[in-house]
Amino acid sequence: MREGVMQGDGHGRERAAEREADRQPDLMVDADELREQVRDKYREVALSPHAGHHFHTGRRAADLMGYPKTVVDALPDRAVESFAGVGNPFSLRPIPAGSRVVDVGSGAGFDSFVAADQVGPQGRVVGVDMTPEMLTKSRATAAQLGLTHVEFREGLAERLPVEDGWADVVISNGVINLCPDKKAAFTEIQRVLRPGGVLQFADIANGRPVPVEAMRQIDLWTG
Amino acid sequence: MLEDCGFVDIAIGPPVDTFAGAPGEDKARSYAVFGHAFLATRP
């Protein structure tokens, strides 16, 4: 299903990166199949943000996660409507002005735009996402907002298109739980952070153990 | 897992009832799923 949306040489490189990223131990599920389903789900969120997903989206979600109303209200609908985060990565610490930030799984760009406001024009934000429709949306919104210190790149959490030690801060929101190999994702985040750099992210945690047989059902990861 | 990956100074924020009122609430409740903010530093 991605044949129509992945283009040119980028398709081959991306698939090769995914295969490389998949050389890992017991992941409970097939990594390629999980990524396909995650792309399908978040394609829907990009194109039909109000379609009635199993999680909250948009301004309702941002309000529930505790984002300041002034911050959310300052952004246009297209920057907020596909937000599907599970918490607030800025709640424990604002990002210092001038920081270089990587947003892992940037989606339609909501958290990247919040970060861009915090770091100011002397800082830099790089959003990374694997869903083409999200990238199209986030890039268009950044252009609409005239943000020249924000860019969006295609990539995987386990293979970030960012040089070693570039980032002062890495943010993410509701993405690591969807990675088939979380340890690989965290190791990759360490690679792009400078020594002393900070990972500040939001994600879900379960208070009751999930049976192994349930963890092997991909549908439960995305729905 | 953050410690296993070498992060230090790890902090976890209070729970957020992420799925409250959403269609996925029942499933989230069955595993006591909540959202959290996390902080961790690369040494």
Image (cartoon, grey):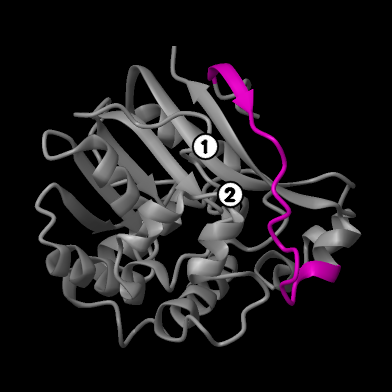
Q: Is residue A157 above or below residue B22?
A: above
The stretch of residues the image draws in magenta is: B6-26
Tell me the tag on residue B39: none
In the rendered image, residue A171, in percent from the top left (x then y), is placed at 42, 40
Q: Which residue corresponds to the image point at 56% horizontal and 24% vertical from the top-left?
A: B5
The type of residue carrying mark 1 is: Ser
The type of residue carrying mark 2 is: Gly
Q: Is residue A31 magenta?
A: no
Quarter of the image holding residue A8? bottom left
Q: Which residue corresponds to the image point at 44% horizontal and 11% vertical from the top-left?
A: B43
Q: Are marks 2 and 1 in contact (CB under 8 Å)?
A: yes
Residue ID for mark 2: A87
Q: Which residue corresponds to the image point at 59% horizontal and 20% vertical from the top-left?
A: B10
Q: Quadrant of the N terminus of chain B?
A: top right
Mark 1 burial class by Cα count in 10 Å: few <14, some 14-19, many 20+ = many
Q: Give the chain of mark 1.
A: A
In the rendered image, residue A76, in percent from the top left (x then y), is placed at 29, 70
From where the camera sits, is residue A147 visible?
yes
From where the camera sits, is residue A105 visible?
no
Task: In the displayed orientation, state which residue is furthest to the front.
Answer: A70
Residue A39 in the figure: left or right of residue A183 = left
Tell me the tag on residue A91: 1
Q: Which residue corresponds to the image point at 23% horizontal and 29% vertical from the top-left?
A: A97
Q: Nearer the viewer, residue A78 or A46?
A: A78
Q: Is residue A206 above or below residue A139?
A: above
